Image (tube, helix red, strand yellow):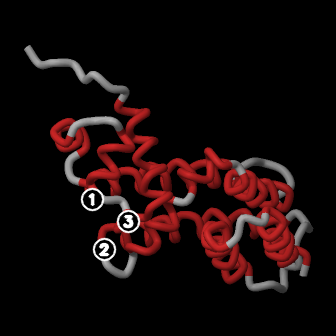
């Protein structure tokens, strides 16, 4: 009879996301991972595979969860600009909250891996296509509803919004000043008013 796990796999998984967010992929040694997760090496391998397997699983989970939430927001009926605002200010709130920020910064370490890891690069490419499409469809709807200047290149604006979301995680690594994130977000959102 197989032994049941003596740890909460979901809790350990989220702790791993925090560790990768804090130290980056390269900086998270196997020992840091084992100490931070509080599990034995064999338990890590049996449950999650290698460090790389765990990292890729964590990034996929995080990106899919966050992108699905963004798509759901953008598909809501009604005014679009307030929804886009809410998406950006939610990111700012997450980056300003110490606990939520730890997991959010996994994106920072994942983006660092893009040039070196085809699987991570593919993940972000698929995410880009998905979110740019969702932003573009929402922007077209906003234009049809009279919320936006329809002379704008809405596809370029969708790309801008996609990349601006990820840029906020980079900014959060460079400064602890919460006002900087808010100011950058305000400038980003002003592109919707042109």
Residue sitting at x 85%, y 76%: 187
- The residue under label 1 is 52
Could you tell me which secondary element the residue under label 3 belongs to? helix
Residue sitting at x 39%, y 44%: 36
Do we see residue 143 in this rendering?
no
- The residue under label 3 is 27
- The residue under label 2 is 117
Disc 3 residue crowd, few under 14, some 14–19, many 20+, Cα 10 Å: few
In the rendering, at what x and y percent does residue 35 appear? 33, 43
Q: Quadrant of the N terminus?
A: top left
In the rendering, at what x and y percent does residue 182 appear? 83, 65
User: Which of the two marks, 1 or 3, is nearer to us in this view?
Assistant: 3
Q: Please give left or right for residue 140 compared with residue 120 in the image.
A: right
- Distance CA(mark 1)–CA(mark 3): 12 Å
Decide: is 83 above or below 47: below
Q: Please give left or right for residue 105 compared with residue 4 in the image.
A: right
Residue sitting at x 40%, y 51%: 58
User: Which of the two marks, 3 or 2, is nearer to us in this view?
Assistant: 3
Dot 3 or dot 2: first in sequence order is 3
């Amino acid at each position: 009879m197989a032994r049941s796990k003596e740890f909460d796999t979901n809790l350990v998984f989220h702790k791993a996301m925090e560790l990768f967010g804090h130290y980056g992929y390269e900086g998270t040694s196997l020992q840091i991972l084992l100490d931070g997760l509080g599990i034995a090496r064999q338990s890590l391998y049996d449950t999650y595979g290698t460090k790389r397997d765990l990292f890729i699983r964590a990034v996929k989970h995080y990106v899919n969860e966050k992108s699905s939430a963004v798509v759901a927001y953008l598909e809501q009926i009604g005014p679009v600009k307030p929804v886009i605002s809410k998406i950006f200010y939610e990111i700012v709130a997450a980056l300003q909250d110490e606990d939520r920020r730890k997991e959010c910064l996994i994106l920072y370490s994942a983006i660092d891996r893009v040039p070196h890891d085809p699987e991570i690069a593919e993940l972000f490419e698929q995410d880009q296509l998905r979110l740019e499409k969702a932003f573009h469809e929402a922007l077209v709807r906003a234009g049809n509803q009279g919320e936006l200047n329809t002379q704008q290149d809405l596809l370029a604006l969708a790309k801008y919004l996609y990349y601006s979301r990820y840029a906020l995680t980079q900014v959060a690594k460079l400064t602890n000043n919460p006002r900087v994130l808010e100011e950058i977000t305000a400038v980003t959102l002003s592109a919707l008013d042109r």
